[in-house]
Image: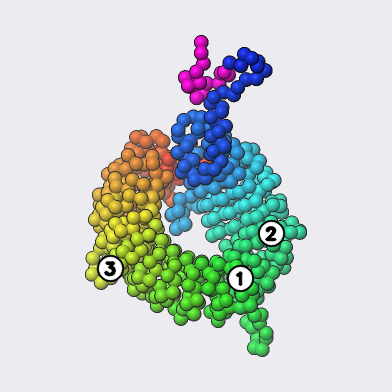
């Protein structure tokens, strides 16, 4: 009987007959040859989406792709179990893991909800001895987790903790002392407990491999002498972001020792004590001038604006400037921004007023990303920025790709102007702080403005809506927002039809966040055809009932449907027709086993 390789199944492990003339040699199985060739090709495939497509071709391609995947990205830590992930992907050197949904940033998720790193680091410790990089976002990380991480991977090089909590300076000390090849330690917007441990002193003596050290979120004093020595012996250091306990005098000393920096977070940007009259201050401008490679500046906490001229020497080369902690006015900004002709990324507080945004628009013609944050996010305040500054940006910064804009009032005309002038927008997040705020001039809903954004900005993938919107706005989003992947809705909508338009029209939707909107069971059930394609749906303070949520769980067993309330407990689950306080729904290959008592998984 002949054994034609073309007739064999891809899982057939029978060996082909040996060559009769050379019995000692057996040619490799045809499928094995294909797998070997495929593995050599897949090494060059870096895009996650492309790799996912390859893994769906057949079992042998799935196996080859898994064996060659060096980076593992998991957008929801509950989408798959750690054991299943590590069993499939055996040769991973880099792991990126996300936990809590984004609304956790707004205190809409109880702090003990979950997203624990412990089971993941335990599984990785046994499966990935060559692990070099870990990126965590909105995860609960303990000092014990960091100790396991530091002691399990001898070649570990990069750790980034973004919006994480649960650990302290004790855990950082273990990482610093044990990870001797550490290149990156980035702590970004994380909550770090002060254990009164001098973690900076725990880095090994001698030259280090550090390339990035970010700890601006650490709200406790650090050992500056140890930091200064660490910076001096880190010749490869390119990124350094300091916390509020580093004054401008200490910043000067660090910059003198690290002129190679490309990214700098300045710390407090004020002296530790009031400078006495007649005292000689360092020449701060000369320190900045010596950093010829500096392209990104941030920090400026507790800023004294009189020190701003110190950064003038580097303004011409800056591509990124973050003033989101700097309470400065339009005039103080103008002296800096007028020198920043190459700026592409700019974050700022609304204290600069519309006049400051007009200065930005006049100078920064290459601007790609703008974020304007509020000093006071209370409703009914007279906001310092409005449609006037927004319109100036729309007319002056036509290469804009991403905008986050907090304001108290807006007009459809300004939003329409941005849609016409900035067609390359990928991210559009307009946050009109007062609820149900209409057009400032016409008092009409903001439907036409947001409609113009989804019509004219063909590359749009992320959208956040606000102000007074009717179902018409959501019909525009459903009709034209074919590439929208992330949609955030708050205090909006007329009826269930609004959400139906979105779920039936936005075919690329991955993440949907809704709060305080009048959408109920009918709207929720209209998305049955699409939920398996989404990463998650969040609805809080809407009108969905336990009965509607249970129907979703019944029809879609591959989804995890969580309902919970801050005040609920395991004994008081409520009636079927009761409106649920929070619904969090996501696709998963494994049910979580660490749900607190107030979380009911339907």
The residue range painted magenta reads 1-16
Q: Is residue 421 above or below residue 310?
A: above
Q: Quadrant where the C terminus lies?
A: top left
Helix, strand or loop at mark 3: helix
Number of the front mark, 2 or 1: 1
12 is within the stretch colored magenta: yes
Residues 573 and 267: in front is 267
Q: Residue at x 63, y 77 (%)?
A: 286
Q: Residues within 10 Å of mark 2 (few under 14, many from 20)?
A: many
Residue holding disc 2: 199
485 is within the stretch colored magenta: no
**Mark closest to the chain's N terminus, 3 or 1:** 1
Q: Residue at x 28, y 68 (%)?
A: 413
Secondary structure, magenta segment, majority class:
loop
Q: CA distance from mark 3 to mark 1?
A: 42 Å
Q: Quadrant of residue 257?
A: bottom right
Residue holding disc 3: 413
Helix, strand or loop at mark 2: helix
């Amino acid at each position: 009987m002949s054994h034609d390789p073309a007739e064999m199944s891809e899982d057939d492990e029978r060996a082909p007959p040996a060559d009769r003339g050379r019995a000692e040699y057996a040619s490799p199985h045809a499928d094995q040859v294909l797998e070997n060739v495929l593995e050599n090709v897949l090494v060059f495939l870096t895009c996650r989406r492309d790799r996912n497509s390859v893994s769906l071709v057949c079992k042998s391609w799935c196996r080859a792709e898994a064996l060659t995947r060096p980076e593992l990205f998991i957008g929801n830590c509950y989408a798959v179990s750690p054991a299943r992930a590590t069993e499939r992907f055996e040769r991973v050197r880099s792991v990126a893991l996300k936990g809590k949904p984004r609304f956790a940033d707004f205190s809409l998720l109880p702090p003990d909800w979950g997203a624990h790193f412990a089971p993941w680091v335990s599984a990785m410790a046994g499966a990935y001895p060559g692990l070099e990089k870990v990126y965590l976002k909105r995860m609960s990380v303990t000092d014990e987790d960091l100790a396991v991480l530091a002691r399990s991977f001898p070649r570990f090089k990069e750790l980034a903790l973004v919006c994480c909590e649960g650990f302290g300076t004790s855990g950082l000390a273990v990482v610093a002392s044990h990870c001797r090849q550490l290149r990156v330690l980035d702590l970004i917007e994380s909550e770090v407990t002060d254990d009164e441990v001098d973690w900076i002193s725990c880095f090994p003596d001698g030259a280090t491999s550090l390339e990035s050290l970010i700890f601006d979120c650490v709200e406790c004093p650090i050992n500056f002498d140890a930091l200064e020595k660490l910076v001096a012996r880190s010749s490869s250091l390119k990124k350094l972001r300091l916390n509020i306990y580093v004054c401008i005098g200490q910043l000067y000393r660090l910059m003198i020792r690290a002129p190679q920096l490309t990214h700098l977070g300045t710390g407090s940007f004020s002296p530790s004590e009031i400078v006495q009259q007649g005292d000689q201050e360092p020449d701060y401008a000369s320190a900045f001038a010596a950093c010829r490679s500096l392209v990104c500046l941030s920090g400026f906490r507790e800023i004294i604006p009189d020190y701003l001229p110190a950064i003038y020497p580097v303004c011409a080369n800056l591509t990124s400037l973050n003033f989101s902690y700097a309470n400065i006015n339009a005039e103080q900004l103008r002296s800096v921004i007028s020198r920043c002709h190459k700026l592409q990324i700019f974050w700022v507080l609304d204290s600069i007023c519309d006049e400051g945004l007009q200065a930005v628009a006049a100078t920064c013609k290459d601007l790609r990303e703008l974020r304007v944050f509020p000093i006071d996010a209370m409703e009914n305040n007279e906001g310092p920025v409005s449609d006037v500054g927004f319109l100036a940006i729309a007319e002056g910064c036509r290469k804009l790709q991403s905008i986050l804009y907090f304001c108290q009032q807006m007009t459809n005309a300004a939003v329409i102007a941005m849609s016409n002038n900035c067609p390359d927008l990928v991210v559009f997040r307009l946050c009109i702080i007062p609820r149900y705020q209409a057009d400032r001039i016409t008092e009409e809903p903001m439907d036409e403005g947001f409609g113009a954004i989804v019509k004219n900005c063909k590359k749009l993938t992320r959208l956040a809506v606000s102000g007074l919107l009717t179902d018409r706005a959501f019909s525009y989003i459903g009709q034209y927002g074919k590439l929208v992947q992330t949609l955030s809705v708050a205090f909006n909508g007329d009826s269930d039809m609004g959400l139906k338009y979105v779920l039936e029209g936005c075919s690329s939707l991955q993440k949907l966040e809704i709060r305080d909107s009048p959408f109920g069971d009918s709207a929720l059930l209209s998305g049955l055809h699409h939920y398996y394609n989404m990463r998650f749906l969040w609805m809080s303070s809407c009108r969905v009932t336990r009965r509607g949520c249970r129907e979703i769980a019944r029809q879609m067993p591959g989804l995890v449907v969580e309902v919970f309330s801050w005040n609920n407990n395991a004994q008081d689950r409520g009636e079927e027709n009761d409106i649920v306080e929070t619904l969090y729904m996501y696709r998963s290959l494994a049910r979580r086993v660490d749900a607190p008592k107030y979380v009911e998984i339907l």
